[in-house]
Amino acid sequence: MADDDDLDAVRAVVAGDLSAFHRIVERWQGPLVNLAYRFCRDRGLAADMAQDAFLRIFRALPTFRAKSSFSTWMLSVATNVYRSQLRRNLPELAGLEALADIPTLSEAPVPTSGSQEELVRRAVHALPSKYRDAIVLFYFHEMNVNRASESLGVPPGTLKARLHRARGLLERRLRHLFNSDTVPTEA
């Protein structure tokens, strides 16, 4: 289903054909669950969060004005739902200092790439939410700056600043955790 098909489905739902929402759910269920998973790292909770997001999207369809693409608008609604639910339901995340218990790679017997990936995931999850959300959308959900900034409701420059700050925090923390002068960077 392309953006035109999404718009057709939105128009049909707003006109009273509630079954047209099924097409939207079929197309976007996987991406919304995956996005929720990036926020909470729990498949069951991610499915529940996506269901709540679909409910909010359904209720908000009459307010969609097509100023941006439907997918951007929908992901923005879903992101706001996920962020709200995490603030309400999850205990306060430990700061980056809480990761100090994790042995550095030099202390581990033979680090695997999987353990390095887990350290990176945990470091990202420990970031303050405004930085974590930017990293999740831009890198893990592979949104470009404009779509990620629209989804978060911030200007592109603000998103770029948050990404820059988040990368700096991650680099310092991972350098400490890896006990190394070289931290894997993007190409």
Image (spheres, grey):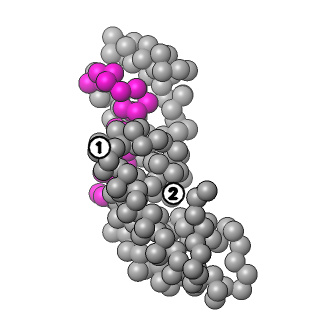
Question: Residue 148: percent from the left, percent from the top?
Answer: 40, 43
In the image, residue 8 sits, relative to residue 165, either above or below, namely above
* Residue 90 visible in the shown view: no
Decide if residue 181 is on the left or right side of residue 151.
Answer: right
In the image, residue 49 sits, relative to residue 68, either above or below, namely below
Question: Residue 98: percent from the left, percent from the top?
Answer: 42, 80
Residue at (52, 44) in percent of width and height: 142
Q: For mark 1, does the 10 Å Cα neighbourhood hold few (<14), some (14 to 19), or many (20 or more) residues?
A: few
Which comes sooner in the sequence, label 2 or label 1? 2
| Residue 145 occupies quadrant | top left
Q: Amino acid at mark 2?
A: Asp
Q: Amino acid at mark 1?
A: Pro
Along the line of sight, the residue nearer the viewer: 100 or 106: 106
Question: Residue 83: percent from the left, percent from the top?
Answer: 34, 51
**Quick one: quadrant of the C terminus?**
bottom right
Instruction: Give the tally of numbered discs.
Output: 2
In the image, residue 16 sits, relative to residue 133, either above or below, namely above
Q: Verify whether residue 88 appears in magenta.
A: yes
Residue at (26, 24) in percent of width and height: 63
From the image, tell me which residue sits under label 2.
Answer: 42
Q: Secondary structure at mark 1?
A: loop
Q: Verify whether residue 83 appears in magenta.
A: yes
Along the line of sight, the residue nearer the viewer: 30 or 117: 117
As drawn, the label of residue 155 is 1
Q: Residue furthest left?
A: 63
Q: Which residues are magenta?
A: 63-89
Residue at (46, 53) in percent of width and height: 136
Question: Residue 58: percent from the left, percent from the top?
Answer: 35, 28
Q: Secondary structure at mark 2?
A: loop
**Quick one: quadrant of the N terminus?**
top right
